[in-house]
Image: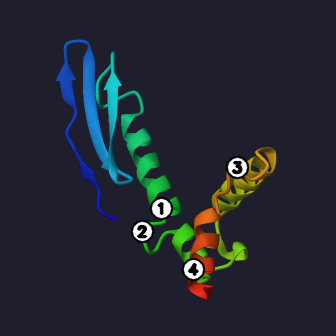
Amino acid sequence: MTVVATASTPTRTGYHHVEHVMGTAVSFDVRDGTPDGGGLGEAVAWLHHVDQTFSTYITDSAISRLGRAEITLDDIDDEVTEVLLLCERLRDDTEGAFDAFVASKTKKEEVSA
């Protein structure tokens, strides 16, 4: 996993931090406190954890491996199972307007065509 971070920059009212993760830049603008406290490190670590776990662009993520059938639902962490169940509930609640698996279905349909 590549972690690219921009150092926190002090501002007049706090500090600003930009973290490059998930193919984008996430900006933190903290109005009080210091970069060392307040959970910035925890927030940044969580973003990288989510990216490493759920990214379809990272070949060894749980989601990528599940999509390629290298692992099964029995092999994934409870966290991934919980998110997949929430996605399924949302698909039901929206009558299919939200479908976390639509890309994989489309890909399979293209392959079989």
Identify the mark nearer the N-term, 1 or 3: 1
Q: Which residue is mark 4?
A: 110
Identify the mark nearer the N-term, 2 or 3: 2
Q: Are marks 1 and 2 in contact (CB under 8 Å)?
A: yes
Disc 1 vs disc 3: which is toward the camera?
A: 3
Q: Position of residue 95 (x, y in %)?
A: 79, 49
Q: Is residue 23 above or below residue 105?
A: above
Identify the mark nearer the N-term, 4 or 1: 1
Residue drawn where x is 58% and y is 84% of the image:
70
Q: Amino acid at mark 3?
A: Ala
Q: Which residue is mark 3?
A: 97
Quadrant (top left/top right/bottom left/bottom right) for the N terminus: bottom left
Local packing at callout 1 (Cα closer than 10 Å; few below 14, some 14-19, many 20+) is: some
Identify the mark nearer the N-term, 4 or 2: 2
Secondary element type, mark 1: loop
Q: Which residue is mark 2?
A: 58
Local packing at callout 4 (Cα closer than 10 Å; few below 14, some 14-19, many 20+) is: few
Q: Are marks 1 and 3 in contact (CB under 8 Å)?
A: no
Going by the image, does 7 lie left or right of 68?
Answer: left
